[in-house]
Image (cartoon, rainbow, N blue to C red):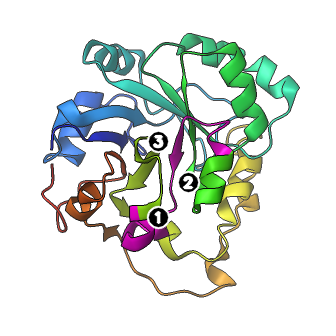
Amino acid sequence: MNNMAFSASCRGKAADIPVEDFLNLKFPLLDKGCIETVFGFVEQTPLYGGRIFEAPEFSDADIDYLYRHNTGLKLPLTNHFVSREEYESNQWLLDKYHRKGNSVVLVNDELATWIRADFPDYEIEASVIKNIGTQTLIDRYLDTYEIIVLPMTLCTEYSLLAELHPKNKLRLFTNAGCAYNCPARTCYKSISKINKLPADEGFDLFNCSQQKLRRSRLGFMDFDIDRLYSLGYRKFKVLRQFGSKGSGY
């Protein structure tokens, strides 16, 4: 199954830890030749979302290593709230990493349109935060995004997954944490606001729905990658090593 393409998380990596060492430590069973992209923070920008920016996770040496090994960098620019002025003042970051093989994962549709027009070498990916989970929505958003990350909750909905298309434009998770059964996902918009503020400010804005909307604590879940592969899926997002369900490619 060497035609699988993984986007691997480097969340939490300290910039002084070489990316090669981090991938070997966190994904020891994953064929590194199948890692298409890795994602995490580079320089600070108010365009980030998903996680609160505290420090860069990649060094320039890491980027050099990725390029030498034909691995792309994915920028998590998933801020909900982006003005044209903010976009223009942060084009320096997009320009620095603009090359074939690199990608951006986004929530804001206007930002996706601007980047596609100005930086055509990036692959434009729709974040799971957009919750695109029906064929109707897939058809609508493929006009704006080249790849769509499907909701984590669909990773066990095999009948539906069999019907969704085009599968070469869809990405599934190999595993999932608290977002899998979160009923509100209020954290994402609050993080978008926090990442616009100076470092060490705004943490009191963080809003997790766990205290208001109780749900079962499922821990970290691994999905059946073999079964997802059999349905025709080849693109995956991996948050940590998997293998309890599947071959641990």
Above/below status of 29 relative to 218: above
Residue at figure coordinates x 66%, y 62% from the top left: 187
Mark 3 or mark 2, earlier in chain: 2
Residue 61's disc is: none
**Span highlighted in magenta in the image:** 141-162
SS for callout 2: helix
* Image spot of residue 169 (x, y percent): 47, 41
Q: Which residue is mark 2?
A: 128
Q: Specify whether 53 is left or right of 140.
A: left
Q: Inspect this view and state whether residue 173 appears.
A: yes
**Mark 3 or mark 2: which is in front?**
3
Residues at badges 2 and 1 in contact (C-beta under 8 Å)?
yes
| Occupied quadrant, residue 230 | bottom left
Q: Amino acid at mark 2?
A: Val
Above/below status of 124 relative to 97: below
* Image spot of residue 213 (x, y percent): 66, 85
Q: Which residue is mark 1?
A: 152
* Image spot of residue 124 (x, y percent): 57, 31
Q: Residues within 10 Å of mark 1 (few under 14, many from 20)?
A: many
Above/below status of 64 relative to 196: above
Q: Residues within 10 Å of mark 2 (few under 14, many from 20)?
A: many
Q: Amino acid at mark 1?
A: Met
